[in-house]
Image (cartoon, helix red, strand yellow):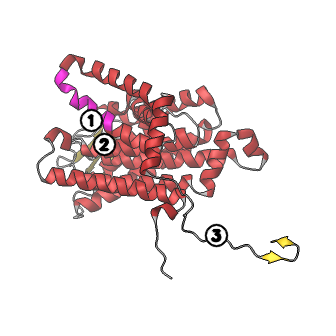
């Protein structure tokens, strides 16, 4: 007897994951084909890597805000840690003979590790707080990370790698400055690609969706829904919230490394409070806890400012008006109901197969059994 694997027969989480990977891959293929055919403007081509970076940031922050239920306003700090770490690692490996792909891989891994360490050190004291206090403290730590990058000076020469908190590194005449305090990183070799961004988006989706559908993910959501009930059944709330926070910071560092290596010059001021709020807007606009909503919101809100550039002085005003209208439409019950009906038509839920054989009733001496 032949068995056919149908999408409708898969478990819901497996089906959602397959749809997510399929749609992201289809979008990548379509954009790549349009790019090869010259049908995408140069300004939009320059935004492809930042779009991938912001998608990674939105998905990773959703793990904290949507899945864990904690409000974090310092996500740009982890992004900056990953960005400047990736730039330093890439600069150190320039003369190693590694191809650009190899250097990018090491830079992304290094940025993720450093951001994860920052997330662990910050999460231990911060996650003991709740509500507005947590948001304020994460905002403060995000600013601390940014200011920490303002005082870091790094360079390399024939004697090795130099790292100090003052500009007197004592580099040789042939040495190169990698980080220059508030002036940031200059003369960065741009090695980020749209393909690398696509792969990192898939990795982020894989990590977050697997956490959501794992035993640890269910424990995180239980702590979010009712902390007292979770503690009463023996769940270590601090442990699971810290797990979500560290994974989110690690993914943010990965996206930050990709972002940093996409620009020839990068300043620490780029990762200020406004960037953290922008990432939070992606999450809120797309729907808290909604991974696909965050992806769409990050894509649209990254493109809109450039699309409205022709309006000159009214560009940001138009952007704000569109954002307000989208928020009103997104959270309107009638519109949400219609979108839900449309989704059910496109992706119907599992229903009983009318051709399925029904169990036969057998008769016994005492009646129907």
Relative to residue 69, is residue 223 drawn left or right?
right
Q: Main secondary structure of the magenta part?
A: helix
Q: What kind of element bears circle 1?
A: helix
Real-space Cα distance between discs 2 and 1? 8 Å
Pick whichever, 220 or 85, lies toward us: 220
Labels 3, 2: front one: 3
Circles 3 and 2: CB atoms closer than 8 Å: no
Location of residue 40 with respect to 269 vertically, above or below? below
- Residue at the image point whose x is 47% and y is 47% from the top: 344
Question: Which residue does the numbered mark 2 point to in the structure image?
Answer: 51
Relative to residue 323, is residue 307 drawn left or right?
left
> Which numbered disc covers residue 358?
3
Residue segment shown in magenta: 300-311
- Residue at the image point whose x is 39% and y is 31% from the top: 278
Q: Earlier in the sequence, mark 3 or mark 2?
A: 2
Pick whichever, 2 or 162, lies toward us: 2
Pick whichever, 313 or 322, lies toward us: 322
Real-space Cα distance between discs 3 and 1? 54 Å
Real-space Cα distance between discs 3 and 2? 51 Å
> Which numbered disc covers residue 219?
none
Question: Which residue does the numbered mark 1 point to in the structure image?
Answer: 303
Image location (x, y in percent) of residue 84? 34, 44
Which quarter of the rendering shows the C terminus? bottom right
Relative to residue 102, is residue 112 drawn left or right?
right
Q: Residue 107 colored magenta? A: no
Residue that extends furthest to the left in the rendered view of this protein: 38
């Amino acid at each position: 007897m032949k068995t056919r694997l149908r999408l409708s027969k898969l478990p819901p989480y497996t089906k959602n994951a397959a749809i997510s990977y399929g749609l992201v891959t289809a979008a990548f293929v379509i954009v790549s084909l349009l790019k090869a055919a010259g049908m995408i403007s140069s300004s939009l081509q320059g935004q492809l890597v930042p779009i991938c970076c912001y998608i990674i940031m939105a998905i990773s922050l959703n793990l904290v805000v949507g899945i864990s239920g904690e409000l974090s306003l310092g996500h740009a700090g982890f992004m900056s840690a990953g960005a400047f770490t990736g730039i330093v690692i890439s600069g150190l490996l320039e003369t190693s003979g590694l191809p650009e792909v190899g250097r990018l891989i090491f830079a992304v891994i290094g940025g993720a590790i450093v951001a994860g360490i920052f997330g662990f050190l910050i999460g231990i004291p911060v996650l003991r707080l709740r509500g507005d206090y947590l948001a304020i403290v994460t905002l403060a730590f995000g600013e601390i990370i940014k200011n920490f990058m303002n005082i870091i000076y790094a360079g390399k020469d024939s004697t090795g790698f130099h790292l100090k908190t003052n500009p007197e590194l004592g580099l040789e005449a042939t040495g190169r400055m990698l980080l220059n305090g508030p002036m940031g990183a200059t003369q960065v070799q741009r090695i980020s690609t749209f393909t690398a961004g696509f792969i990192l988006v898939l990795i982020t989706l894989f990590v977050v969706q697997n956490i959501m559908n794992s035993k640890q993910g269910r424990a995180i959501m239980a702590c979010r829904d009712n902390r007292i009930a979770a503690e009463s059944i023996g769940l270590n709330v601090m442990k699971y919230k810290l797990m979500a926070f560290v994974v989110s910071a690690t993914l943010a560092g990965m996206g930050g490394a990709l972002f940093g290596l996409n620009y020839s010059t990068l300043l620490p001021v780029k990762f200020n409070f406004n960037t953290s709020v922008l990432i939070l807007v992606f999450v809120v606009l797309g729907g808290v806890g909604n991974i696909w909503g965050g992806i769409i919101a990050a894509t649209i809100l990254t493109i809109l400012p450039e699309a409205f550039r022709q309006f000159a002085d009214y560009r940001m005003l138009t952007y704000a008006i569109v954002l307000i209208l989208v928020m009103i439409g997104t959270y309107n019950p009638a519109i949400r109901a219609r979108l839900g009906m449309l989704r059910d038509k496109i992706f119907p839920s599992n229903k009983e197969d009318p051709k399925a054989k029904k169990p036969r009733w057998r008769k016994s001496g005492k009646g129907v059994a």
